Image (cartoon, grey):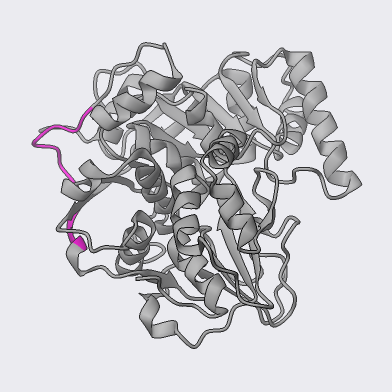
Amino acid sequence: MGSTMIEKILARSSGKESASVGDILFARPHRILSHDNSAAILGIFKKLGGKKVWDQDGIFIALDHAVPPPDAKKAKSHTMIRDFVREQGIRYFYEGGTGICHQVLPEFGHVLPGVVIFGSDSHTTTHGAFGAAGIPIGRTETASVWALGETWLKVPPTLKLELNGKVREGVTPKDIILYIIGRVTADGATYRAVEFHGSVAEKMDMSGRMTLCNMAAEMGAKAAMVPYDSITEDWLERVTDEEYSPLFPDDDAVYEKVLDIDCSKITPQVARPHKVDNVVPVSELDRTKIDVALLGTCTNGRLEDLRQAADVLRGKRISPGVRLLVYPASRKVLKEALDEGIISVLIESGAQLAVPACGPCLGAYGGILAPGENCVSTANRNFKGRMGCKDDTGVYLASPATVAASALEGRIVSYF
């Protein structure tokens, strides 16, 4: 009987010859990521009796959730993290402004195929785009891994998604994953690994694959992966000299369920408030007024996303009364978007440009909604209060093209 990707990766990371669904094992990560929550984690680390981290090269910290810090409490947390990084000699620390952890980690070559990436952020699943197992864990577990270099896991079953069919013009990876979540539901992959296969996934660029894997967390996935191929190899050649050894599922791997997704049937999609699986075609919402359009986040803040929005906005002005907020996923993305003229197009349309970070996605700062306001966003969550205000607000999730087109019209529309 063959093995799935997660079974092979977890077996390797735990030093075992094989692993099967339900096995309990201790996995050692290639990297473990955290962000501003490192202040809380280091407190737990010390309470647990931690003196020295297990591997100064194994820990990755990026300040991204409150950058620049909007209040004294968050500024103090950042200072605590910097002091801890110096004290411990942690090598991979990225100061605020470098970007969002899920973008920075692969940009600097820290994600390799066939490894485990633990992360104290639920969207650590993003790193499965590179054939790794990106596994979210809690803060206490993270503190424990900082001290011991391993933690225990139960090997999950795997849901295999076959993405085939000719993708319609204007349909993006965000539309595809929203459509899938609408079908699988928000808890349909709880404590399961997800593998993306099929011709659509095989042709998709790394940005699109990161979007798929990022949002798999919204189905409850423990990890989500796209098998390594030449597209992955091309990315890695640009960012790392480290050796790696990809792992692939066996032809006779046993999956809990296989779903065939005919992508030719998918049109631009939107997730309505207040659940990510409350998904409908954009065409059903053309009377929904918006106040804010958010372009960015770890889901869709990459160069390809900004370019997609600029193509819609070029030579036009956003609707009066709408705030178009742009949060590039990283400084590298911002630099490339500047060089390509994308940022000029966005600003000339009326957009407000912010430092690469998470900003309003989680309601931290820089775009909090007022009572009664609606936002169409490229982010990944739309539960009540997500953008900082619980009073009669609505967050609609959509692709960069839909967000840009909606900013022009002042209501949710599809560009195509």
Q: Is residue 260 magenta?
A: yes
Q: Residue furthest right?
A: 72
| Residue 309 on image: x %, y % | 48, 58
| Residue 341 on image: x %, y % | 54, 45
- Is 4 in front, or is 231? 231
Quadrant in which residue 218 is drawn? bottom left
Q: Residue furthest front?
A: 315
| Residue 79 on image: x %, y % | 84, 31
Quadrant in which residue 67 is drawn? top right
| Residue 64 on image: x %, y % | 67, 40
Figure check: 350 above or below 134? below
Q: Is residue 333 magenta?
A: no
- Is 337 in front, or is 217? 337
**What residue is drawn where x is 40% and y is 73%?**
414
**What residue is drawn where x is 42% and y is 55%?**
220
- Range of residues picked out in magenta: 248-263
- Is 322 in front, or is 159? 322
Q: Quadrant of the C terminus?
A: bottom left
In the rendered view, does 255 fall on the left or right side of 64? left
In the rendered view, does 63 fall on the left or right side of 68? left
User: Can residue 120 be seen?
Assistant: no
**What residue is drawn where x is 10% and y is 33%?**
1
